[in-house]
Amino acid sequence: MKKKLLSGIIAGAALLTLAACGNSDTATNNTDSSALSGKVIAGGSTALQPMAQQASTDYTAKNPEVQITVQGGGSGVGLTQVLAGTFQIGNSDIFAEEKSGIDASKLNDYKVAVVGFAPIVNKDINIENLSTKQLIDVFTGKVKNWKEVGGPDEKITVIGRAAGSGTRVNFNNLALGGATEVDGPTQDASGTAVTMVGQTPGAISYVAFSYLDKSKDIKAVSIDNVKPTVENVADNSYKVWSYEHMYTNKEKETAVEKDFIKYVTEDIETIKKLGYIPISEMKVERDAQGKITNK
């Protein structure tokens, strides 16, 4: 009788041990994003802001213990502040190597999408295309009236972007051949650039494709008869484009940041819906020195 009782106790203990092990495995397997929590500030590029904002809304709905704040400020701000620790994610339209004073070796670079940049004019300007030379002449102030490039007899108002803007860096380098914009009114954000062009007769500026449908008062202009479209960016027919980067600080990167960036990159539907291009659909690659190679 004592032997049977002892055997029963041992068997019961073994079952409890197995159950405990099973529960432990289940808890481990159920971690991942469902167990993530924390606060993340993702700031910088206003060209990337619409996608970052939409992704943060969708992500936090699925991960209620995570709080993500998306801010603008420009690519330069994003890179500077992620190194300083003020931002956990620095959004940028440019490679960190392109920004003076930034130690790129201290940052993790995640390319989450590609975006094109287009010249935009007030809808009343009957211009559909500008050659590269005409574009340079307009933005450097050499050409001051639209009639000089086939448009109406109306003064040109160039609305530029702030010095820390990644959109400005890319447009100046890729569309204007490195030329310096004429001094004039500037805007810190893509959204306000769209508004100003729409409200200012004779105005011209440039924004990311993701802002082209924000107002009926502006229209995009082709360059050298190549339309600013997703398809033309994908094969580099239209050359004014850049990667959208999300940078993290190597020493401070957390699981939450990595998981959110992974979510952004894999949300192909939102990327396309908002006017960006998935990395996987690009037919070419560009490095930090501007060299283009076919995939």
Image (cartoon, helix red, strand yellow):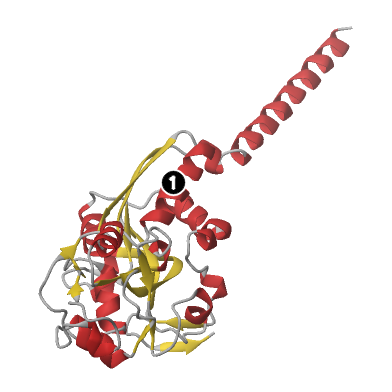
Identify the residue at the far left of this view: 183
How packed is label 1: few (under 14 Cα within 10 Å), some, or many (20 or more)? Answer: many
- Look at 48% across and 34% down and name the residue there: 64
User: Which residue is more in the foreground, 169 or 125?
Assistant: 125
Residue 215, image quadrant: bottom left
Q: Is residue 272 left or right of residue 151?
A: right
- Look at 47% across and 87% down and name the residue there: 237
- Which quadrant does the N terminus fall into? top right
Question: Can you give x and y, in whole percent of width and height, for residue 43 in the image?
Answer: 30, 53
Identify the residue at the far bottom of this view: 133
Residue labelled with disc 1? 56
Residue 177 in sight in this render? no
Q: Is residue 283 left or right of residue 245?
A: right
Question: Can you give x and y, in whole percent of width and height, for residue 103 in the image?
Answer: 22, 69
Question: Can you give x and y, in whole percent of width and height, for residue 218 in the image?
Answer: 35, 66
Residue 140, image quadrant: bottom left
User: Which residue is more in the foreground, 95 or 258?
Assistant: 95
Identify the residue at the far top of this view: 1
Q: Give the SS element for disc 1.
A: helix
- Which quadrant does the C terminus fall into? bottom right
Q: Is residue 259 left or right of residue 178?
A: right
- Look at 33% across and 59% down and name the residue there: 91
Question: Can you give x and y, in whole percent of width and height, for residue 235 in the image?
Answer: 51, 84
Residue 150, image quadrant: bottom left
* Relative height, residue 244 to residue 175 (above, below): above
Give amino acid for label 1: Ser
Residue 281 in sight in this render? yes
- Look at 50% across and 69% down and name the residue there: 277
* Relative height, residue 4 to residue 178 (above, below): above
